[in-house]
Image: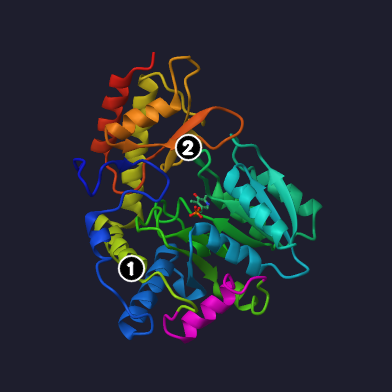
Amino acid sequence: MKEASVDRPYLLLTPGPLTTSATVKEAMLRDWCTWDSDYNGLVQSIRERLTALATKRSDEYTTVLMQGSGTFSVEAVIGTVIPRDGRLLVLTNGAYGNRIAQMARIYGIAVSVQDFSETEPVVPERVEQRLSEEPDITHVAVVHCETTTGMLNPIAAIAAAVKDSGRTLIVDAMSSFGGIPLDVADLRIDYLISSANKCIQGVPGFGFVIANRRSLMRCEGQARSLSLDLYDQWATMETGDGKWRFTSPTHVVRAFDQALRELEQEGGIEARCERYKANQELLVNGMQQLGFCALLKKPLQSPFITAFYCPPVASFSFMELYARLKAAGFVIYPGKISAADTFRIGTIGEVYREDIAKLLEIMEELRFW
Ligand SMILES: *Cc1c(COP(=O)(O)O)cnc(C)c1O
């Protein structure tokens, strides 16, 4: 745990951007030329390392980096990989799933939505059923960890249902990739999307797509946007040895390289997952002892972010809790679901058990009832 300072007045207990290490921030103190081999070599190395983090069968996959926040990368996938005569099924249980459906509608892509409600996981058997009823569905999109609630959807069983029926599978793993072990080849995921500022613990500025090569090769000329053309971005990076089509976030890329090194130093994804799990378990148990109630049952919670009900007492106000925690060195997150009054606490980033223990001490001192 670090004490608050000018550089770090508070710890971000949010789903990203999150608190990064001093060394990740320091890595940005240099300027880079975007067509020089020093920089392009860095880009290629990052792409290779991301693919290797995602699967043991890395020759079957390739990684594309895309400017912008994570949503831009999701939109690049949705706008590029679905052919004109395709139909997308979006499995939803929160705001990020709904956002994917909204993107498809804006692009004029035929879209079906199967909703499971915010507090229930996606049920693979029902997906299988839906796919047999709607044979014209060609692509299925699902959010791995629905950050709206912290729900971890059962990705292996969902992937099996989608792939056994021959559909293309798109996974928004924004808030989970790098924080939980998973192999895209074993799960037969065609496109997995994440971004620099979540579990890899970089700073915000770009997202990335880990794509099955054979699926991506079929997408040339299909994009409905110039700047978000996933295929063209990939082709330029691949043939230009790490060149981006348009100005790239050089400092962010350099910081991400450092963040990847630190992930490795920590012991890789397994070790990071253990740290996040320890953080989250300490948080939930401690909050429960203080009288707070988590929105989701334990088996549905992810190690990344947890939603709690606002206590139904007049003495409780989220804004007051927020302000008092901020003054004590912690920033938490408001709720995002429509069905209940909640707030959220993230357990990812440069955050350790000691930090969570300190947060709980302060929560206890605050006593809202
Ligand atoms: C963070 C996040 C995104 C992307 O959000 P941006 O604000 O665009 O970075 C998308 N999906 C999920 C599940 C997320 O957690």
Gap between marks 1 and 2, in whole Å? 34 Å
Q: Earlier in the sequence, mark 1 or mark 2?
A: 1
The N terminus: image quadrant: top left
Q: Nearer the viewer, mark 1 or mark 2?
A: 1
Residue 70: x %, y % from top left: 50, 58
Q: How many marks?
A: 2
Q: Nearer the viewer, residue 75 or 267?
A: 75
Of the residues shown, which amino acid type is indicated by label 1? His
- Binning the other alpha carbons within 10 Å of mark 2 as few (below 14), some (14 to 19) or many (20 upward) gives many
Q: Nearer the viewer, residue 340 or 50?
A: 340
Which segment did they paint magenta? 224-243
Q: Quadrant of residue 305?
A: top left
What kind of element bears circle 2?
loop
Considering only vertical position in the picture, is 140 above or below 66? above
* Residue drawn at (22%, 59%) of the image: 23
Q: Is residue 91 left or right of residue 271?
A: right
- Binning the other alpha carbons within 10 Å of mark 1 as few (below 14), some (14 to 19) or many (20 upward) gives some
- In this orientation, does residue 188 appear? no
**Residue to which mark 2 is pinned:** 301
Asked whether disc 1 touches disc 2, contact meaning CB atoms under 8 Å apart, the reply is no
Q: Which mark is residue 251?
A: 1
Q: Nearer the viewer, residue 93 or 55?
A: 93
